[in-house]
Image (spheres, rainbow, N blue to C red):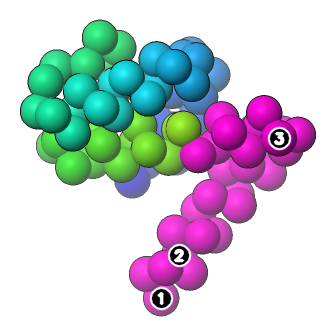
Amino acid sequence: MKIPVIKKLVESYSLDQLRKAEEDIADEKAPAIEVKGDDTGEQLTHAYAAIQVLEAIEQGDDLKTALRSFTARVRGSIG
């Protein structure tokens, strides 16, 4: 998971575009938007993360807070 990639997705695309890209990647199709990643799993992770961050922004968080909150949840689920 690369934070700069997630940030760029959040800044560049709408929720609908990101959800469609996530669906396409999960269905092993090429997404209409560029989602960088070393493999399909990382691309899917980046799309999912961008969706979560953008949803938090729509709820009132700023980008920095939304990213920090998402990464904290990920660390908590791993540790």
Give residue 75's position: percent from left, percent from top: 53, 75
Label at residue 75: 2
- Secondary structure of the residue carrying numbered label 3: loop
Q: Which residues are magenta?
A: 52-79
Q: Is residue 58 left or right of residue 42?
A: right
Q: Is residue 42 visible?
A: yes
Q: Which residue is mark 1?
A: 79
- Binning the other alpha carbons within 10 Å of mark 1 as few (below 14), some (14 to 19) or many (20 upward) gives few
Is there a contact, CB below 8 Å, between mark 2 and mark 3? no
Q: Sequence-wise, which precedes: disc 1 or disc 3?
A: 3
User: What element does badge 1 sit on?
Assistant: loop
Q: Identify the residue at image location x=34%, y=25%.
A: 21
Labels in figure, total: 3
Q: In the image, is residue 57 part of the stretch drawn in magenta?
A: yes
State the image coordinates of residue 24 (x, y, percent, origin top left): 24, 27
- Quick check: 79 above or below 23? below
Tell me which residue sits at (63%, 22%) in the image. 11
Q: Amino acid at mark 2?
A: Arg
Q: Which residue is mark 3?
A: 59
Depth check, mark 2 against mark 3: the one in front is: 3
Q: Amino acid at mark 3?
A: Gln
